[in-house]
Amino acid sequence: MIKVQNLTKFYGKTAAIDGISFQVNKGEIVGFLGPNGAGKSTTMKILTCFLPPTSGEAEVCGFSIFQNSMEIKKRIGYLPENPPLYKEMKVRSYLEFVANLKGVPFSQVKSFTNEAIEKCNLQSYSEFEIFKLSKGYKQRVGLAQALIHKPELLILDEPTSGLDPTQIHEVRNLITSLAGKHTILLSTHILPEVSMTCEKVVIINKGKIAACDSVENLTRSFALTYTLKVRGENTEKLISELHQIPEVSSVDLETNETLKIKLKEDRETAVKISNCAFKNEFLLLELKKEAASLEEVFIKLVFTE
Amino acid sequence: MLKNIYIIASKEIKSYFLLPSTYVAIAFFLLLSGYLFNGLLHSFFKTMALANLPEYDSLVVNINTLFLSPFILNLSFVASIILPILTMGTLAEERKLSTIELLFTSPITNWEIVIGKFFAVLTLYTFLLTITFSYSVFISFYGEVEFLPVFVGYCGLFLMGATLISLGIFISSTTESQILAAIGTFVVFFLLWVIKSIAPALGETWESILLYVSVVNHVSSFSRGIFELRNVIFYLSAISFALFLTRNSLESNKWKG
Ligand SMILES: Nc1ncnc2c1ncn2[C@@H]1O[C@H](COP(=O)(O)OP(=O)(O)OP(=O)(O)O)[C@@H](O)[C@H]1O
Ligand SMILES: [Mg+2]
C-alpha cells in the first residue's frame, strides 16, 4: 500500500527526513513513532502529495507520488496535524463539503456523511458550528473528514492529540474497528497507543528510520538481553559456563562486575543464569531483564547511541 | 472539472453568508450606491424642473446620459471599495487555517480551486449589481429609459468587477493575513483610480499607456452604452492573466510550509 524508498526532504539546508525507506502492506495498521521533530509529519505530507520530496521515490496505493498524485488523492483520507476545519461551517455541512470534494457521488453524500458522524460519535453536534466545539470534538470532526469517503488508506497525524482519556479510548477503538477495511498509518508519540492499536511500528528519529517491524518482534528482540551484576573470583570461567546455556548467544563483560547476556530465546533462562552464578560461587547482586516494553525499545532506539 | 468548480464555489458562497465581513461589504455597497443614486436623483430632478421652464423649451432630458451613465461610473467606484473585503480571505484564510492542506490533498486541481473561488465572489458581486439594476427600473417610471445602453454599462461593470476580483484573489494568495490582503488590494485598486485621474497630465504617450493599464478606465465607454470589443478583450485577458498568476502562486512551495 505504501512503499517508500530513500525519501529525503530538505527544508533549506536541514534535512527533515534523510533517506528513509519502509513499507506498509494492505490491511495493516502501522504506528509511526518518533520524538518531536523526527520527521513524522513531513513524511505524511509527502505521502499525501501535499509536499514534494527533495529526492527519493514513494508509491502510495500503487501510484507514484510524482506521476499520479490525483489517483493517490482519490484513495486516501488524511488527518493533518492541525485539522483542516472551516470554523464558520456547521459540522454536517462541512462534512458534506468534504465528501463532495473527495468525489463521493452526489446521491451518496448524505449517507456517507451520516456514517462518518456516527463513527466519530458526533450525532449530538452535527448542527453545531465548528468554532463552538471543544478541541477534542474538533479533532473528531477532523477524523470524520478523513474517513468520510471510505478511503483505502488512512493517514492520521496524531489522531488522539487533544482528546481526553475516554475520548482517546474511543478513538483507539474506532481505529481498531477500521482494521481490515482500511490500511492505516498513524503517527503518535504515545507508546501505549501503538501497542494497543498497531500491529507494526516504524520508528523514526532525526529523519532516519530506527526500526521497522511488528510490535511483537520488536519488543521480543529487545527483551532478550539480561544484565547480570555479580561479585566473585573467576569471571572467565563464569563467562564460559554461561556460554554453555543453550539459549545464550553472547556474553559481554561490561565492567568487571557487570555482564550483558544476550539470548536467542527466553525459557526461564534467568534461573539458569543465576544457578550458574551460584555454582561458581559468585555473589549475585542484580539480574535484570532489559527492554521489555515498546517504550524501552523506543527510548533505546531514539535516545541511546 | 465543472463539478469540482461548482463544489468549491457553492461552499464558498454558503460560507460568505456566515461571515460578518460579507454583510459589512454588502451594507456598505448598498448604502453608498443608494447615497450616490440619491444625489444624482436630486440633480436630475433639478434639471427636469429646468427643462420644464418655457425658456428651455428645446432641451430634451435624456435619462441615460444625464443619469444612468454617471450612476454606472459611480458604481464602478463603489465596487472597487468593497471588492477587497470580499476577496481578502479567499486564499489567505485557507493558508492561515491550513485548510489548504485539505484542498491540496483532495482530488481537485489548483485551477479548479482558483476558478471556484473566482466564481463565488463573482456570483456575490453579480447579485449586488442586480440589486442596483432595479434602481434603473425605478427611474424608468420618470421618463424614457433606453435599456440597451444600461445593459451595456452593466456588462462593463461586470467585466471590470470580475477583473478586480481576479486581482484581489491573486493578492490574497500572496499572504497568510487577510488584513494585509485587504490593504494590499485596496491600495492597488486605489492606484488604478489615481493612474486614471493623473494620466491626462503626463503627456500623450503616458496617458494612453496608463489609461490602457488602468482597469477602472475601460468601464467608461461601457457606461456610455458603447460596446467595444477591444475593451471586452482587455478585461478577459486581464482576468485570465490574474487567475493564471494565482494558480502559479498556489503551485509554488511557499504554500506548503
Ligand atoms: N516548514 C518548515 N520549514 C522549516 N523546517 C521545518 C518545516 N516543517 C518542519 N520543519 C523541520 O523539519 C523537522 C521535522 O518536522 P516534522 O514536523 O516532520 O516533525 P514531527 O515528527 O512531525 O514532530 P512532532 O512530533 O513535533 O509533530 C523538524 O526539525 C522541523 O523543525
Ligand atoms: Mg508532527
Image: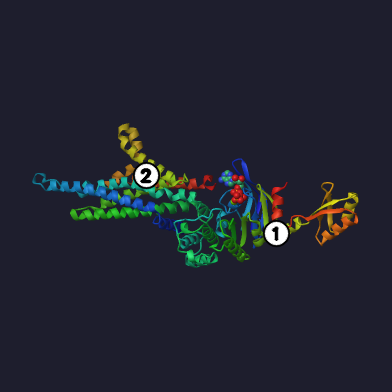
Q: Where is residue B151 in the image (x, y as percent from the top left)?
A: 28, 52
Task: Look at 59% across and 55% down and name the residue there.
Answer: A158
Instruction: From the viewer's perspective, tell me whether residue B20 is left or right of residue A28.
Output: left
Residue topped by disc 1: A215
Give the Cα distance between marks 2 and 1.
Answer: 64 Å
Q: Nearer the viewer, residue A33 or B158?
A: A33
Select label 2 or label 1 by which is in front. Answer: 1
For disc 1, the neighbor class at 10 Å (few under 14, some 14 to 19, many from 20) is many
Specify the label residue B16 is tagged with.
none
Instruction: From the viewer's perspective, tell me whether residue B161 is left or right of residue A245.
Output: left
Q: Which of B168 and A214 is in front in this view?
A: A214
Q: What element carries label 2?
A: helix
Specify the label residue B234 is tagged with.
2
- Residue A295 visible in the shown view: yes
Q: Which chain carries label 1?
A: A
Q: Position of residue A33 (x, y in %)?
A: 65, 54
For disc 2, the neighbor class at 10 Å (few under 14, some 14 to 19, many from 20) is some
